[in-house]
Image: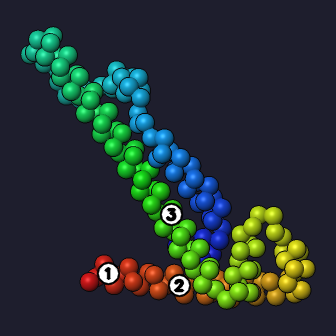
Amino acid sequence: MTAEVMMKEYKNMKKELTVTEFQLRQFQGVSEQDMIDSMLYSHQEGERVQTSTLSDKTANIAMKYKAAMERENDEWYDFLFHRYMFLKEELDFFEHAVNGLDERHRSIITDLLDEDMTWDIMMERYHVSHTMIGKYRKAALKELDKQYELRDRQVEAFALG
C-alpha cells in the first residue's frame, strides 16, 4: 500500500476498524436457526443409500450440525480477526509514519485527513497559496512513501531470510 492510497482510504479504514472491533467483541457466531435453515435447504451430492436406522440418522445429523456450525463460526471469527489485524497494522503504521514527518508536513497531512478542513482554510492557517499546500502535500507523501518502501524491504528481507 502507498501513502497516497492510505490518504484516500484512511477514514474508511478507521470506520471499518471500529465496526470490525465491535463485531469481534460481540461475536456470537452463526445462530442455530441460520445453521438449521442452511442444512435444510442444502442438497447432498452423490447417490443416497438408506442403510442406517432412524437413531443413527439423528445422531449423524446432530454431529454434522455441530461440526458445520463450529466450522462456520471459526471461519467467520478468523475472517474478522485477520481483517481487524490488517486494518490495525496498516493504520498504526500510517499514523506512526505521519508522526515521524517534520512538523509542517505532519500538520499538512493531519489537516488533509480532517474531513472538515478545506484547502482554503489551510491556505489561511499556513499563510500560503493553494500551490504551496500542494507542494507540501507532495513532499510529505514522498517522505511517507520512503517509510513504506523501508517497511516493504524489511518484510521482503524477512521472507527471503
Callout 3 amino acid? Lys
Q: Residue at x 62, y 80 (%)?
A: 99
- Give x and y (percent) for residue 26: 48, 41
Residue 88: assigned label: 3
Callout 2 amino acid? Gln
- Residue found at the very far front of the displayed protein: 25
Quadrant into which the C terminus falls: bottom left
Residue 45, quarter of picture: top left
Query: Which numbered disc flags the more N-terminal residue, 3 or 2?
Result: 3
- Tell me the colour scheme of the image: rainbow
Q: Does dot 3 land on a helix, a strand or a loop?
A: helix
* Callout 3–callout 1 Cβ contact below 8 Å: no
Q: Does dot 1 land on a helix, a strand or a loop?
A: helix
**Residue under pointer 2:** 147
Q: Does dot 2 land on a helix, a strand or a loop?
A: helix
Q: Residue at x 55, y 56 (%)?
A: 17
Task: Check the image and report above or below for 4 versus 68.
Answer: below
Q: Residues within 10 Å of mark 3 (few under 14, many from 20)?
A: some
Query: Which numbered disc flags the more N-terminal residue, 2 or 1?
Result: 2
For the residues labelled 3 and 2, the Cα–Cα distance comes to 17 Å
Callout 1 amino acid? Phe
**Residue under pointer 1:** 158
* Left or right for 142, reference 39: right
Q: Residue at x 50, y 63 (%)?
A: 88
Task: Check the image and report above or below for 48 versus 133.
Answer: above
- Give x and y (percent) for residue 85: 45, 60
